Image (cartoon, helix red, strand yellow):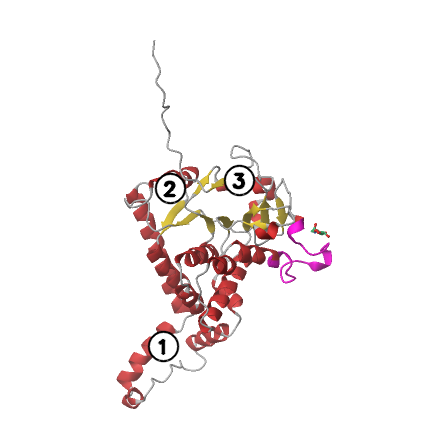
Amino acid sequence: MAPFRRALILAAIILTSLYLLHRHQSNTAPTVLSQKAEATSSSNDKAASNAAAPAPYTPPPGTAKQQQLQKFHELRKRPLKEQLAYQFPYNVRSKFPKFIWQTWKYTPSSNLFEEKYRESEASWTEAHPGFVHEVITDSVAKHLVKYLYGAVPEVVEAYNAMPIPILKADFFRYLILLARGGVYADIDTYALKPAQEWVNPAFKPSNLGLVIGIEADPDRPDWHDWYSRRIQFCQWTIQCKPGHPVLLEIVSKITKETLERKRSGQLTKDHHTVLEWTGPGPWTDAVFQYFNDPEYFDMETSTGEIGPMNFTKMTEPIQVGDVVVLPITAFSPGIGHSGAGEVDDPMACVQHGFEGLLPKMELSLRLIS
Ligand SMILES: *[C@@H]1O[C@H](CO)[C@@H](O)[C@H](O)[C@H]1NC(C)=O
């Protein structure tokens, strides 16, 4: 996409989010109200302004404002997951939003953007005409999280408390997908097929809300030495509609864990902790938790708990409720284990760990006669 068009689109997105945020705040959040209230009370009422703490604002009883404020305070007492569900309602009948989200230290318009990622980054734009494709930098991500999650400050606090960039990058993909939906893809992934073609139309997109792939299916007794889960779902590429319950689950799980670690002084940085904090392990757990949640699924008709064994060695996509799980070849082609097919397999959709193939010239001396 031309830099100018990109800038124009980004400006439009930011203006829209500012507008929505503003509208949203005037609907529900008390922050705007209380700031105004403080200003009014300190100018109107000298006694109140002399008090040690400004009196909390209370709109006249019975007014719409007071009801809104009360509703907001009641909502804030609900569990985190319910607050998030209220902020980001899920509608399975909506369309998959036409967003491609990626994160990196630099945007492609920067001359610091690594050459080895140019081809993979461009592959997403080329495969998705009509989509908004954004590479979000750390500083933009920080502001976006603050805007999107202003009404659920625990999430912003957790994001800011994370001690290393890889945790924030992991968390950000879930946050942007919960709030806006679309496709998230790591910067070193290559789009082999447009997202609209990942799932066979027989699956009816209006019945789906989440599309995931398998990262590993280690069918060996010592699998635990290599992977944290017997079946591991990828989180380097995810497609969803905003507000999907698995995203609600992972965002509230990570937020709680981070704030708990912050409180107990356990914001450690070792690699294993990272994997179990925000990585494919907890992501996989969130998916299985959803599959077995009586809040969403009718357990009367269930034929037993859904676990890793229901997905091992699968070669065709499997639908569970509104989730499609793609076989390992879809997002992990060419990995050389777990029964994955090659990159040119018709089922391959995304290639991970793609670092560009600079065409090399043949190094040989040849006589042209
Ligand atoms: C999942 O696999 C278990 C056996 O591991 C089986 O009992 C159960 O019926 C399967 N669930 C579905 C929905 O096929």
In the picture as drawn, the residue positioned furthest to the bottom comes out as 47
Name the image quarter holding the N terminus.
top left
Q: Residue at x 29, y 91 (%)?
A: 47
In the image shown, does 110 or 31 lie closer to the viewer?
Answer: 110
How far is disc 3 from disc 2 in space, using C-alphas? 19 Å
- Give the residue type at disc 2: Tyr
Q: x, y (%) of residue 195?
A: 49, 42
Magenta residues span 289-309
- Helix, strand or loop at label 2? It is helix
- Helix, strand or loop at label 3? It is loop
Tell me if residue 154 comes above or below residue 364 in the rendering.
below
Q: Residues within 10 Å of mark 3 (few under 14, many from 20)?
A: some
Instruction: Left or right? Give the position of 133 relative to 197.
Output: left
Q: Is residue 265 visible?
A: yes
In the image shown, does 274 or 56 lie closer to the viewer?
Answer: 274
- Helix, strand or loop at label 1? It is helix
In the image shown, does 276 or 43 lie closer to the viewer?
Answer: 276
Where does label 2 land, which residue? 117
Where does label 3 land, which residue? 335
| The quarter of the displayed image where residue 163 is located | bottom left
Of labels 3 and 2, earlier in sequence is 2
Of labels 1 and 3, earlier in sequence is 1
Of labels 1 and 2, earlier in sequence is 1
Q: Residue at x 45, y 58 (%)?
A: 171
- Give the residue type at disc 3: Ile
Where does label 1 land, which residue? 34
